[in-house]
Amino acid sequence: MKTGLMTYHLRRLRRRGLITRIPLTHRYQVTDQGHRAARFYITSLSRVIRPTANDLDNPQLLHRLAKKIAPTKT
């Protein structure tokens, strides 16, 4: 990752209150809000996103999704 992009991401995280800079260093630490956001992301990934992705192995579900996505003829 280039330094400009890293600076951009760190600035965004700092503005949202997810990390804070340790004074007189180039290091950061995760805030309590950052820990809560990370825990929420991990929990939702394991409970919502992964089970839904596993359901895609079901041929009937794939057929229904394909019907919804396919453009209708007018």
Image (spheres, rainbow, N blue to C red):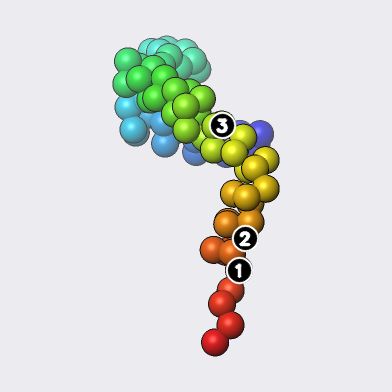
Which residue is denoted by mark 1 in the rendering? Answer: 70
Question: In the picture, which quadrant includes the C terminus?
Answer: bottom right
Q: Residue furthest front?
A: 60
Q: Does residue 70 appear left or right of residue 20 in this picture?
A: right
Where residue 67 sits, quadrant-wise, is bottom right
Type of amino acid under label 1: Ala
Query: Residue 66 — which label?
Result: 2
* Separation of residues labelled 1 and 2 (CA atoms): 6 Å
The vertical placement of 27 against 44, above or below, is: above
Q: What percent of the width, then of the height, locates residue 60? A: 62, 50
Q: Are marks 1 and 2 in contact (CB under 8 Å)?
A: yes
Element type at mark 3? helix
Front of the two marks 3 and 2: 2
Query: Residue 46 — which label?
Result: none
Which residue is denoted by mark 3 in the rendering? Answer: 50
Residue for point 39% across, 25% down: 40
Residue for point 62% across, 35% down: 54
